Structures are given as C-alpha cells and as structure tokens.
Amino acid sequence: MKCLGSAEIVKNKKKLLRKEFDLFGCLKNESVCKMIERFGHLKLELARHGIIYSQEELVDKLFDSLPDEMDWQYFVLMLKNTIESKNLTVDLLIERLESHELEIKKTHKVNHSSYQQNLELYYPKSMIPKNVSPKTAFSAENSNTSSKESSNSGFHTRNLQSSRWCS
C-alpha cells in the first residue's frame, strides 16, 4: 500500500495516464517503431492502474497518432478500407505499421545513393574498421581496392585473414 500511495495519489495518477492517452501522438522526427514502443509502455501503465480501453479505442488512437506525412495517411486509408474494423486488433495494426515503416525505409534507401550501411549489423562495435568505406560486395560504387576486383564477378575481394567475420 505504501508503494502505491494514498487514494489521492492513485486517483491523480489515473487522471494523468488518461490525459497522456488522450494526448498521445508521434513526436517530431520519431520513427513509428519508437512511437509503438512508447504506446506499449503507456498501455502497460494503463492496465497496471486498472484503466482499460477497448480494442477499437486503442486502434483509433494508433491511427490518430501516426505522422501527418502523406504516405502514412494513404496507408491508414488503405487499411481502413481493406480490413473490417471488427477484425482489426492492436496487434495486427502494429504488425502492419512496422511492416510499412520497413517498406518506407527500403524505398528511401534505394532512392538515396548517399545512404550509408549500418556496419553494426555486420561487425561487433569493437571491430568496426576505422576510416573504411562501408561498401559491400553489392555496392554499386567503385572502391579503392579496384585492383583486387575480379572483372568478371563484380564482387570485391577481401583479405579474410585481416577481417574477423565471427567472434
């Protein structure tokens, strides 16, 4: 009881959580994935305090929270017109939103040649080479090791002894 606080504190906490739910939205420069993560935390806090919203209210809140960018608005319109509202759960919506965000990132990556690959996907942080261009075998750009390239294969060769691929 001491951890929860007095009845007045609990009442104010519930009031604050409801207000937070009402005002919830995607922050400027926040990814939809991060917004969904924050939404999950809010939903857990609401449940912990006995505040329950229906699936329809939660789905509507997520739809309303999405960025105002046109590709998101078109996506929302498409989802609303293709999935019956009674079949659209929070989990299904989150799955579709995360999938759409990945598609947007993929399209953005393909359309922007200055995109730099995330080397942390390939190497542990401690092993990322310094001052090395993040090119891979599939890079369209020429590398400084062009003399080591096979003219027939199109792949960059690499000195495997100096690179650790697995730890």
Image (spheres, rainbow, N blue to C red):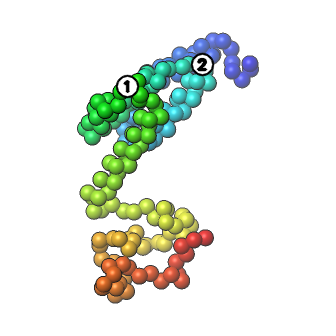
- Identified by mark 1, the residue type is Ser
Badge number at residue 85: 1
Q: Point out the residue furthest to the top here.
A: 8
Q: Residue at x 49, y 66 (%)?
A: 122
Q: Residue at x 32, y 48 (%)?
A: 104
Badge number at residue 50: 2
Q: What is the quadrant of the C terminus in the image?
A: bottom right
Mark 2 crowd level (few <14, some 14–19, many ≥20, 10 Å Cα): few
**Residue 54 place in picture, x, y as percent:** 48, 20
Along the line of sight, the residue nearer the viewer: 78 or 159: 78
Spatial CA distance of label 2 from label 1 is 25 Å
Q: Is residue 100 visible?
A: yes
Tag 1 or tag 2, which sits nearer the N-term?
A: 2
Along the line of sight, the residue nearer the viewer: 127 or 88: 88
**Residue 47 place in picture, x, y as percent:** 58, 24
Whether the residues at callouts 2 and 1 have beta carbons within 8 Å, the answer is: no
Quarter of the image for residue 113 reads bottom left
Mark 1 crowd level (few <14, some 14–19, many ≥20, 10 Å Cα): some
Asked if 125 appears above or below 52 in the picture, the reply is below
Badge number at residue 100: none
Q: Residue at x 39, y 40 (%)?
A: 96
**Residue 62 place in picture, x, y as percent:** 41, 30
Asked if 25 appears above or below 127 in the picture, the reply is above
**Residue 33 place in picture, x, y as percent:** 44, 42
Asked if 60 appears above or below 129 in the picture, the reply is above
The residue tagged with tag 2: helix, strand or loop? Answer: loop
Q: Residue at x 38, y 79 (%)?
A: 156
